[in-house]
Image (cartoon, rainbow, N blue to C red):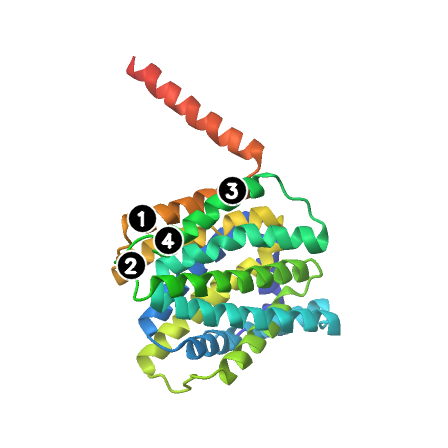
């Protein structure tokens, strides 16, 4: 166990690393979150049980870090604590809906469907913080909706998942809660004391999970093992890094980096769980990811990538000639 001075040095080192490389930290965090759906599916527990344990098991790891931050930066204000509690309730709602969708449409597809946040978060930033967004959002929105419908198996029978239509509805509702949670997480991060805020988020979400119907406090050792992995990889290695990094990135860049979560989740679900979406569902996934990329990447960034690809193609043709 780290003592007080070591906790502070560790947290300072992590915070400096995140400030120096916020995109790398966001990428690692997004990939950590990508493991959550697979681990929860393997646990086989009810949504309320998964929500409670994924938060409660992360708290012992987070508590000493939050204590070190408090000694260095001071305690949260009442306003910051209230925002964190609200974010925690939204995170719990997201987790409850998301876990239900995992069992209905699959871990990989659910992660893609929740990626609708890539449009919702910047809209919240526009409405509340007056942060400008680009016209690309209006252009890609119809394609994003089409991708959601295809992924949900609305236009076919025999789509992947036990109840893909219901799973899509629950995943989209989870995306709304997820978007509001991300917005508050990013907004609160500008005021510092990120780890303490995140501790309050997890405490609030754990309370909601404990009070929700269907929770089981004795799920069995095997299930607890998978939920412990969710807590370590998803809540600490994933969401803590995201909470630290998101304050140093714009809302659109943050949303774009989080696209690594559905890509990683799709790959893990295929390898570990043997999930096999239909071609229409895979087409819907591709449409969602391309729409999210187009909405989140600046025009100059797209032009640089296109120019690089064209240059490499030209070099290849010249070499062949």
Q: CA distance from mark 3 to mark 4?
A: 16 Å
Q: Residue at x 48, y 51 (%)?
A: 27
Q: Disc 1 or 4, which lies upstream in sequence?
A: 4
Q: Disc 3 or 1, which lies upstream in sequence?
A: 3
Q: Disc 3 or 4, which lies upstream in sequence?
A: 3
**In the drawing, does residue 150 fall left or right of residue 143?**
left
Q: In the picture shown, does residue 303 fall above or below 234?
A: above
Q: Residue at x 69, y 73 (%)?
A: 82
Q: In the picture shown, does residue 220 fall above or below 113?
A: below
Q: Please name the residue that numbered disc 4 is placed on.
A: 151
The reply to whether callout 3 and callout 4 are in contact (CB within 8 Å) is: no
Q: CA distance from mark 3 to mark 1?
A: 19 Å
The secondary element bearing badge 2 is classed as loop
Mark carried by residue 140? 3
Q: CA distance from mark 1 to mark 4?
A: 7 Å
Q: Please name the residue that numbered disc 2 is placed on.
A: 160
The spot of residue 287 in percent (x, y) is 41, 44
Mark carried by residue 280? 1
**In the drawing, does residue 278 fall left or right of residue 52?**
left
The reply to whether callout 2 and callout 1 are in contact (CB within 8 Å) is: no
Q: Residue at x 33, y 84 (%)?
A: 220
The spot of residue 293 in percent (x, y) is 49, 43
Q: In the picture shown, does residue 64 fall above or below 174?
A: below
């Amino acid at each position: 166990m780290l003592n007080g001075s070591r906790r502070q040095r560790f947290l300072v080192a992590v915070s400096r690393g995140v400030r120096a490389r916020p995109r790398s930290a966001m990428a690692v965090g997004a990939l950590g979150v990508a493991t959550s759906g697979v681990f929860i599916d393997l646990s086989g527990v009810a949504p309320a049980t998964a929500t409670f344990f994924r938060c409660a098991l992360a708290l012992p790891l987070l508590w000493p870090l939050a204590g070190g931050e408090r000694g260095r930066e001071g305690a949260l204000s009442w306003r910051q604590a209230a925002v964190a509690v609200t974010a925690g309730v939204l995170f719990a709602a997201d987790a409850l809906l998301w876990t239900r969708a995992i069992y209905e449409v699959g871990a990989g597809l659910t992660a893609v469907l929740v990626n609708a946040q890539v449009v919702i978060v910047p809209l919240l930033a526009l409405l509340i913080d007056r942060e400008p967004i680009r016209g690309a959002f209006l252009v890609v929105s119809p394609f994003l909706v089409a991708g959601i419908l295809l992924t949900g198996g609305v236009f076919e029978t025999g789509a992947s998942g036990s109840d893909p239509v219901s799973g899509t509805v629950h995943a989209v509702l989870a995306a709304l809660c997820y978007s509001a949670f991300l917005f508050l997480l990013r907004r609160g991060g500008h005021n510092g004391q990120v780890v303490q805020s995140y501790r309050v988020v997890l405490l609030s979400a754990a309370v909601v999970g404990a009070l929700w119907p269907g929770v089981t406090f004795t799920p069995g050792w095997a299930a607890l093992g998978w939920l412990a992995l969710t807590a370590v990889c998803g809540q600490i290695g994933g969401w803590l890094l995201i909470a630290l990094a998101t304050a140093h990135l714009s809302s659109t860049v943050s949303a774009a980096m989080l696209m690594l979560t559905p890509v990683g989740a799709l790959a893990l679900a295929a390898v570990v769980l043997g999930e096999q979406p239909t071609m229409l569902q895979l087409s819907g996934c591709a449409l969602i990811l391309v729409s999210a990329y187009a909405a989140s990447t600046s025009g100059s960034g797209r032009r640089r990538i296109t120019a690089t690809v064209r240059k490499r193609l030209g070099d290849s043709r010249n070499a062949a000639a």
